[in-house]
Image (cartoon, rainbow, N blue to C red):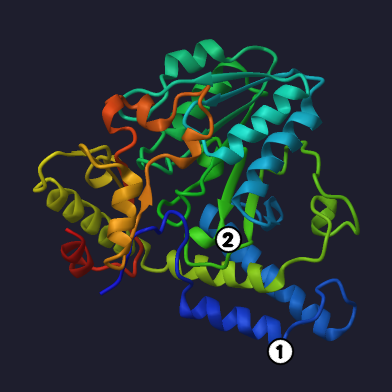
Amino acid sequence: MEAYFDNSATTRVLDSVMDIVTRTMTVDYANPAAKHIKGMEAENYIRDARSIIAKTLKVADKEILFTSGGSESNNMALIGTAMANKRAGMHIISTNVEHASIYNTLGFLQEQGFEITYLPVDHNGHIDLDQLREAVRPDTILVSVMYVNNEVGSVEPVAEISRVIKAKNPSTIFHVDAIQAYGKYEIRPKKEGIDLLSVSGHKIHGPKGVGFLYIDEKLKIRPLIYGGGQQAGMRSGTENVPGVAGFGAAVKEMYTDHAEKIQKLIGLKDYMTDRLGEIEGTMINSKKGEASAPQIVSVSFEGVRSEVLLHALEDKGIYVSSGSACSSNHPGISGTLKGIGVAQKLLDSTIRISFSIFNTKEEVDYTI
């Protein structure tokens, strides 16, 4: 038996995705910028995908910019905003539990003279709203906070965070890394006060190498890639038609009977959590039910190194990920597990189990 429980790293593509990707590579394969009919057919795939995605967020089609994935979306959100708004200020706020594509980008901006404030999290993985309020200044141009933590699944109260930021400084831009959240939640940027939102295709059964950045139409943001002026000059280069078309197909399927799919994931998460609790020396770092993301269980095993456990499970056809790879690359900044108060002796004994709609209870039983 095989049990693939590393879906927060990547997911298997849906059949509908595979079909449309194949079609756009073999039949409707023209350059979408070409003036002939085949070019227009290719462009229609991009238009359709953009419309599907915009509808899930209740935003305008033109506010969706396609990228090569979550890392590029995060880079563009941070660097594009910083460079376009530095006359207004050089201060940026984030948290100490962000993904490497945020940390390393902030490190680059620091080298360019920007000042970065990192907020800690509590044992639930949440930032303190009073600390945030205190940190926002007249020269704070950007705040970047992830929606769902990729290690333990904690969910930040993004709408409340936005209210705190905008009450203190209405011109501060709010960016949300929603790479582990999109497809799992009904996200409404306009309602929740989100100005920029990063998403990746391969986390929701779409292809790798494609993502999008939602950019509120009122924002001033500078492109990272210059050239032929595609996507209204915001990201030059021939669009990845197969990737974008496949992404659109994945979004359409994930948001069809959405509540049902999410209840299935929560059921699997809670069942796995209960079963893990039967094993002596385990410590669950995620919350059950709707108190954390539906797809992530973080668990520590006393006295067992995560890497050893990962390979032992791999020998049985079970695939998980070990602890905190992103945080361990940043020893100067406390990682998620430290942030939520996981004991020192368990930091190197933690694995992440992450689910998709393809997983079953039988796989959970086999893993236990």
Q: Which mark is residue 27?
A: 1
For label 2, count other residues whose C-alpha is less than 10 Å away and answer few (under 14), some (14-19) or many (20+): many
Residue 88 image point, x, y percent? 77, 19
Residue 296 seen = no
Residue type indicated by callout 2:
Ile
Residue 46 seen = yes
Residue type indicated by callout 1:
Val
Disc 1 secondary structure class:
loop
Residue 185 image point, x, y percent? 41, 51
Q: Identify the residue at horizontal 65%, vertical 63% (top origin).
A: 50
Sequence order check: which comes first, mark 2 or mark 1? 1
Residue 206 image point, x, y percent? 53, 67
- The alpha-carbon separation of the residues under discs 2 and 1 comes to 24 Å
Q: Check the picture and name the quadrant holding the N terminus.
A: bottom left
Q: Identify the residue at horizontal 71%, vertical 72% (top origin).
A: 241
Of residues 290 and 359, the one drawn nearer to the viewer in this rendering:
359
